[in-house]
Image (cartoon, grey):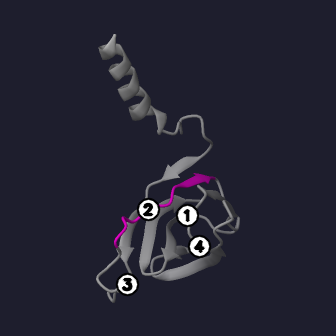
Amino acid sequence: MLKRIVALLVCVLAFGGMKAYADGEGDLVELEVRIIDEIPSIPGGAKTPTLFPTVWQDGYELEIDTPHDEYVLNIVSGNTIVYSVVVYSTVSLVVLPATLSGTYELQLIHDDLCFYGDIDL
């Protein structure tokens, strides 16, 4: 009986915190991170791990899971920023201009970190 309770507890802990994204609309944008300023803003570096934002793309709509930090969102083609907007921490949906077409780099900038990934419009 104790083995069943322990097994049930392990299953609840293992699967209880997972989110189900299979039924969500849009595609998950896979993000990477790079430091854009080599001078640390906190002496000795940050003591907490970096939390990646979760971004979903559905056509020209980008959904950022909340809660999140305030970001500067850039759409970049080559070395040129073709669209930029501030995404406040209370905003979860950003609609991009329909005039954009092609493959772009999505950048979410917060402090000295740039989270980036490719999107197709």
Q: Mark 1 is on which residue type?
A: Gly
Task: Identify the secondary structure beneath mark 2.
Answer: loop
Q: Which residue is mark 2?
A: 51
- Mark 1 to mark 2 CA distance (whole Å): 29 Å
Res 50 → quadrant? bottom left
Decide: marks 1, 4 in contact (CB < 8 A)?
A: no
Q: Earlier in the sequence, mark 3 or mark 1?
A: 3
Tag 4: Cα neighbours inside 10 Å, few (<14), some, or many (≥20)? some
Mark 1 — residue? 102
Image: magenta residue range:
47-58
Marks 3, 4: nearer the viewer = 3
Could you tell me which secondary element the residue under label 3 belongs to? loop
In space, the residues marked 1 and 4 are separated at their CA atoms by 26 Å
Q: Nearer the viewer, residue 40 or 95?
A: 40
Assign a secondary structure to mark 1: loop
- Against 30, residue 68 (above or below) is below
Q: Nearer the viewer, residue 101 or 82?
A: 82
The stretch drawn in magenta includes residue 53? yes
The residue carrying pointer 2 sits among few (fewer than 14), some (14 to 19) or many (20 or more) residues within 10 Å by Cα, namely few
Q: Which residue is mark 4?
A: 70
Viewer-proximal residue among 74 and 2? 2
Q: How many marks?
A: 4
The residue lying at 34 percent from left, 71 percent from top is 47
Instruction: Give percent across and percent down for residue 94.
Output: 67, 63
Q: Secondary structure at mark 4?
A: loop
